[in-house]
Amino acid sequence: MSDALNDIPLTARPAIARGMRLQWEPAQEAHVLLYPEGMVKLNGSAGQIMSRCDGVRTITDIVADLERTYNQSGLTADVVAFVALAVQRHWLEARP
Amino acid sequence: MTASAPVGNALDAPGALVGGAQTAHVVGPPLWLLLELTYRCPLHCVFCYNPTDFANTGPELTTADWIRVLREARALGAVQLGLSGGEPLARDDLEEIVGEAHRLGFYINLITSGIGMTEARIKALKAAGLDHIQLSFQDSTREMNDFLSSTRTFELKVKVAQLIRAHDYPMVLNVVLHRLNIDHVEEILVMAERMGAQYVELANTQYYGWAWLNRDQLLPSRAQLQRAETATRRFRERVGAAMQIYFVVPDYFETRPKACMSGLGSVFLAIAPDGTALPCHAARMLPGLEFPNVRATDIGAIWYESQAFNRFRGDAWMKEPCRSCPEKAKDFGGCRCQAYLLTGDADNADPVCDLSPHHELVTAAVARAERVAGAREQVLTFRDHRVSIPVVIEEKRT
């Protein structure tokens, strides 16, 4: 949560990386991220974050939506850390 | 394996299917479906993994058959779809198959030589919902590409690469490496850079099918391999994140086997052009397996009930040293086809493993290839639908 966190501003608009697809898979009861000949099965919170990464909403928007939906607060650090990890793994593109 | 690794059309383990690995007692769904739509191909590559007797296979499935396969597999939970061959563009119903796969929710990857791709077809495929295209090249120059594929196709492939970019697909190149082109790795990477490739897979040949027939002419030397790895490293340092390069080492140089298909019957289901269902695209050679056909049996029964798909599930089939090996859960004993081709018994440990009592077959093959490399004349057998060559295991090779 050091350098990577600082690299992603809260105004970034993360989007699913080109060539990848996120979808809900009933057979696995999970969101999965699909890419050529591979798949990442996401856990619940990762799925909830990624399904909001539409390239339009900023990280601030996403955090606000999650906090409202799940009646929580203080999710910013978790969301930023996950987005940073997902960008590093080329699952997400963080658009300015 | 990283999340974005474009695993090639060689026989790489689908290790990237996170969450897909099964324990011995639970059979999960066939998450990854590969349709080999046709064995027809305008190329004659010496390293093709297709069976050397493919000329004898029966008629191809119809469009309706393929669509039924897609529906049945998707209903079981299949989600990743590879369309391969042969050259899948040789099927004029490719767009229809892609369209139905997309409606069903598959992630669709087209594995192609590019031959047969046109502006009109790529537009139609994009509109139908094709997610990804993986384009193969044989070498960096027209001469070597055309020689290794026994065709004149280089310029055409360059045009297809432009089409792929123009239609906003990631530019993914796959180059199969072997003794005759591995010294050109740097030139291949420069070519890839000029084409705007974002991903390049340098996949060393795996020795099945036509490649097995030509193995002694195709295995690189250890020195060649090291030079190629050094060149790749230097190139990576220069281009940084602009291009991701995957270098797949030929497993004959390893001391542990690949976790082939994450174990047969674990996540991967291949359907051959004639409808034969296979737990691995090379598995047809394995003796004692009764492969079901989708014309007669539905995908659920094939996957969960058939002898062929249950034969290598779990570890009860294993012999020593695999049976008591702590690594069996990691590599599943390696590749069944390689065990069969090299030792004559598919239940043996993959002899790539240096714990295998047959490991010297692999080191001997490497040594023999080095000797053959020094010979004046070398005979390559090009993939050809006009001939049918039976599989010959190692001890019967001349």
Image (tube, rainbow, N blue to C red):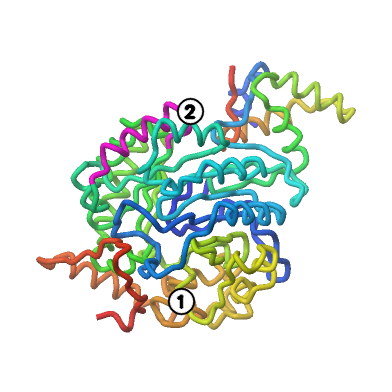
Query: Tag 2, which secondary structure?
Result: loop
**Closest to the observer, B60 or B39:** B60
Residue B163 in sight in this render: yes
**Main secondary structure of the magenta stretch:** helix
What amino acid type should be assigned to the residue bearing mark 2? Asp
Q: Which mark is residue B168?
A: 2
**Marks 2,1: beta carbons within 8 A:** no
Q: Which mark is residue B252?
A: none
Which residue appears farthest toward the right when viewing the image?
A71
Reply yes or no: does residue B117 show up in magenta. no
Residue B392 in percent (x, y) is at 34, 78
Q: Earlier in the sequence, mark 2 or mark 1?
A: 2
What amino acid type should be assigned to the residue bearing mark 1? Leu
2 or 1: mark nearer the eye = 2
Dot 2, crowdedness within 10 Å: few (<14), some or many (≥20)?
few
**Closest to the observer, A87 or B169:** B169
**Residue holding disc 1:** B355
